[in-house]
């Protein structure tokens, strides 16, 4: 009999919970959906269900797809005093206790692990950190975003801050091509991490030579509390990681949206989520209070080098390698403050060159000697690298263009659409000069005597110009994968191709000359071999003037079947504000049997 009454009591309690959850309409509350990471039409995958792929994140077996069922399970398990479920989900408990007016029964005081962790977590301020692009790493071509939680309001407190990062867990044995493929289709698990911020400063600004932008968010105390409590709930919780949309920036945007569910951060559909677009979305929604630029060690060295004469540059190089250079007549002849500047440059160069791995005794001894020399000479005014334009002020990362022109005797019209991001003749403000990062760049053309046809499709097109000087000698490189057209015999054929190469570039004021050795493999309908290979060279000049960008480019390729192709072009890009540009070009293109000259004029529109 007692068992029957117990069963009836449980049924009544369960019915009451279900009725309370249903009548309250909390399953549709924006914050409840944010706590469960429900996709409300923001991306193409998992619409109407949770992005979370971990059953430990739910209290109901269908919680990922049924917000109402998850709500009822949470009410049932979080309501009892000293419930262990409260210790797992403190943000959910806060939400339900506020919405359902639960009495104060001790709250989370019994959750020793959470209380201890919560006391150790800084919460005075929250900043979004944007390490800029790093072209030598496929995973970092578009930059990155992470959150920083500060303990205090001053600069010294930053070094005690915590960094909140979302990233893919990748096996170290995988190559770059497999890495990109699996990243595009969601083949990696993604997790949140919580590490000292100084570790990220070391990784990005020191080791990878990436500039960092710090955007202070204007979250109030209550909003910061939501964010930190939810971070506890996300520990060791698995998501899928996709490069294009469900990436580091998207997850952080979700996290910040939780603090203000009424904001429009997650309202619009996203084909791709690029880190700089996350910054812009937060700015447009009123989250960003201020910004700070933190240059990389390479930028700090460049700022010192720019203050030196050619003789002083040679002395700095020599001083970084041999302490006795400081005793030479040439060094002693310098004014005291110039000696200080040379010594500082040598010290910065030595530290930058030996930033990875363990320092040898020789390097440590030279570093100490240079530091003593710096301290013995009269100091000069602090030299700060020039602050570049903030990435959030650059042109939109998507682009469409309408083009008209002629090739030989025939006129044509062309439409172009680019999913992302930037080519090296687009307006450079907010981007790296000499860098091209394009994904899914489509061009279709209608000539006077031909049907509408695919002219070009760049699946991936990356070009990196890394200028060389006496101190740094990086290698420039490029890779292009996609479809294009070229003359084979008398006809322009569509080819499926992979092309790449390495080379050198320099910076001579606003002018950047470059040269690449190139290789190409292609498949087309005109050649018998399934794959034709070629080798050649590409050279050119970029000119970044104040009001426009211009480029000259020439390339020649020799194929293993004795075919040849060549192109030579001149292009002028004239930005009209941040959203529009006019681009004009002339190109001579051909092969062994035929060559034509093309003139074109296009209007380009940039948007996010």
Image: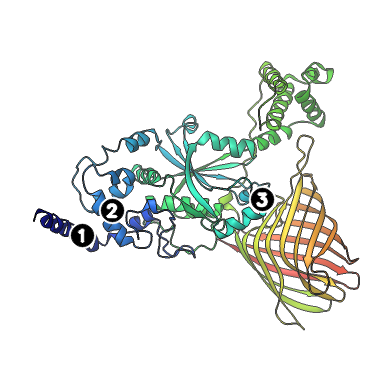
Q: Name the residue beneath numbered marker 3.
A: 175
Q: Position of residue 43 (x, y in %)?
A: 48, 63
Q: Position of residue 92 (x, y in %)?
A: 31, 50
Could you give the CA–CA distance between mark 2 and mark 1, rounded to whole angstroms?
12 Å
CA separation, marks 3 and 2? 43 Å
Q: Is residue 464 left or right of residue 150?
A: right
**Disc 2 crowd, CA 10 A, few/some/many (<14, 14-19, 20+):** many
Which callout, 1 or 3, points to the residue nearer the camera?
Answer: 3
Label 1: how many Cα within 10 Å (few below 14, some 14–19, many 20+): some
At numbered mark 2, what does the secondary structure look like: helix, strand or loop? Answer: helix
Residue 74's tag is 2
The residue wearing badge 1 is 20
Q: For mark 3, does the 10 Å Cα neighbourhood hold few (<14), some (14 to 19), or many (20 or more) residues?
A: few
- Tell me what residue is drawn at x 78 percent, y 41 percent: 468
Q: Earlier in the sequence, mark 2 or mark 1?
A: 1
Where disc 3 sits, the SS reads loop
Q: Which quarter of the picture shows residue 71?
A: bottom left
126 or 73, nearer to the observer: 73
x 66%, y 27%: residue = 358
Image position, residue 381 (x, y; %)? 64, 27
């Amino acid at each position: 009999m007692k068992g029957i009454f117990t069963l009836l009591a449980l049924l009544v309690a369960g019915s009451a919970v279900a009725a309370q959850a249903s009548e309250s309409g909390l399953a549709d509350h924006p914050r409840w959906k944010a706590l469960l990471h429900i996709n409300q039409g923001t991306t193409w995958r998992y619409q109407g269900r949770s992005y979370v792929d971990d059953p430990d994140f739910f209290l109901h077996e269908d919680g990922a797809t049924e917000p109402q069922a998850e709500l009822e399970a949470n009410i049932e398990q979080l309501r009892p005093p000293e419930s262990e479920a409260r210790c797992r989900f403190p943000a959910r408990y806060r939400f339900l206790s506020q919405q359902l007016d639960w009495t104060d029964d001790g709250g989370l005081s019994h959750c020793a692990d959470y209380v201890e962790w919560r006391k150790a977590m800084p919460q005075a301020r929250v900043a979004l950190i944007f390490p800029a692009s790093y072209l030598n790493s496929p995973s970092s071509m578009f930059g990155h975003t992470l959150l920083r939680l500060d303990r205090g309001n001053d600069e010294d407190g930053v070094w005690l801050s915590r960094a909140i990062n979302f990233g893919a867990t990748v096996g170290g044995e995988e190559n770059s091509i497999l890495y990109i493929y699996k990243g595009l289709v969601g083949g990696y698990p993604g997790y949140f991490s919580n590490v000292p911020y100084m570790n990220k400063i070391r990784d990005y600004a020191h080791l990878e030579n990436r500039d960092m932008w710090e955007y202070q968010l204007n979250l109030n105390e209550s909003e910061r509390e939501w964010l930190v409590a939810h971070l506890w709930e996300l520990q060791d919780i698995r998501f899928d990681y996709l490069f294009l949309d469900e990436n580091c920036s998207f997850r952080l945007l979700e996290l910040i949206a939780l603090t203000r569910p009424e904001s429009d951060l997650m309202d619009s559909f996203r084909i791709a989520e690029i880190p700089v677009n996350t910054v812009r979305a937060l700015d447009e929604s009123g989250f960003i209070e201020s910004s700070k630029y933190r240059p990389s060690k390479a930028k700090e060295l460049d700022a010192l080098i720019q203050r030196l004469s050619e003789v002083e540059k040679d002395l700095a190089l020599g001083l970084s390698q041999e302490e006795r250079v400081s005793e030479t007549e040439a060094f002693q002849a310098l004014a005291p403050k110039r000696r200080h500047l040379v010594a500082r440059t040598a010290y910065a160069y030595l530290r930058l060159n030996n930033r990875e791995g363990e320092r040898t005794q020789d390097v440590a001894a030279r570093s100490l000697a240079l530091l003593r020399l710096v301290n013995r000479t009269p100091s000069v005014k602090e030299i700060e690298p020039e602050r570049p334009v903030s990435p959030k002020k650059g042109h939109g990362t998507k682009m469409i263009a309408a083009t008209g022109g002629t090739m030989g005797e025939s006129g044509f019209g062309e439409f172009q659409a680019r999913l992302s991001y930037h080519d090296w003749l687009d307006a450079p403000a907010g981007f790296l000069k000499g860098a091209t990062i394009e994904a899914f760049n489509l061009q279709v053309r209608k000539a006077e005597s031909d049907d509408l046809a695919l002219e070009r499709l760049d699946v991936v097109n990356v070009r990196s110009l890394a200028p060389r000087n006496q101190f740094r000698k990086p290698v420039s490189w490029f890779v292009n994968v996609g479809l294009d057209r070229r003359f084979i015999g008398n006809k322009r054929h569509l080819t499926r191709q992979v092309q790449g190469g390495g080379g050198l570039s320099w910076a001579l004021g606003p002018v950047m000359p470059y040269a690449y050795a190139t290789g190409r493999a292609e498949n087309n309908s005109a050649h018998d071999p399934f794959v034709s290979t070629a080798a050649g060279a590409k050279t050119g000049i970029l000119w970044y003037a104040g009001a426009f960008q211009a480029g000259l480019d020439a390339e020649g390729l020799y194929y293993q079947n004795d075919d040849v192709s060549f192109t030579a072009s001149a292009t002028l890009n004239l930005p009209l504000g941040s959203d529009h540009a006019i681009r004009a070009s002339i190109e001579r293109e051909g092969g062994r049997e035929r060559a034509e000259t093309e003139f074109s004029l296009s209007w380009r529109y940039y948007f996010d």
